[in-house]
Image (cartoon, rainbow, N blue to C red):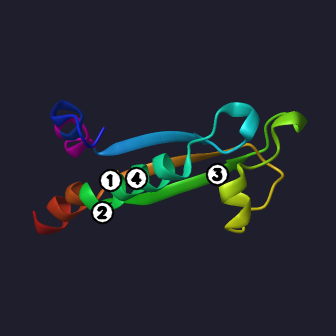
Amino acid sequence: MSNDPEAVQLLSNTAVLLLDVHLSPSMMPPTLWQFVNLFDFLFETLGMRLGWIRSVDGYPGDQSVADFLGVAGLPAGFCCYELALLSGRKQLAEVTS
């Protein structure tokens, strides 16, 4: 996304972004590179902030996490996170108006 000017333009005008992040190896989790770069782009480049987070149990066979997340301390027992990211720019505009 960060290399696509149209995606950057679209996301920079987005007030709320809902994400379903799969962490289980059975659900094609992101690689370490994808995970870090996605959140760096959303939080650092676009200035989004976390508005809401919820873990999702999923099916028993999906209740594990990718190795790099387990090593970082993320416990097994669920498959995914649902996230709502909010635009920091929209909030700033509301405060200043």
Q: Using the image, determine if residue 88 lies above or below residue 3.
A: below
Between the residue at mark 3 and the residue at mark 1, the CA separation in whole angstroms equals 21 Å
Question: Residue 16 got which mark?
Answer: none
- Numbered range of the magenta stretch: 9-14
Residue labelled with disc 4: 37
**In the figure, is residue 38 to the left or right of 89?**
right
Q: Residues within 10 Å of mark 2 (few under 14, many from 20)?
A: few
Residues marked 1 and 2 touching at CB (< 8 Å)? yes
Residue labelled with disc 3: 54
Q: Which element type, helix, strand or loop, lies under badge 3?
A: strand
Residue labelled with disc 2: 44
Residue flagged by tag 1: what amino acid is it? Phe
Comes first in the chain, label 3 or label 1:
1
**In the figure, is residue 87 to the left or right of 62?**
left
**In the figure, is residue 32 to the left or right of 4?**
right
How far from the left and from the top, in percent, is residue 35?
50, 50
Residues marked 4 and 1 touching at CB (< 8 Å)? yes
How far from the left and from the top, in percent, is residue 58?
79, 37
Q: Nearer the viewer, mark 3 or mark 1?
A: 1
Comes first in the chain, label 2 or label 4:
4
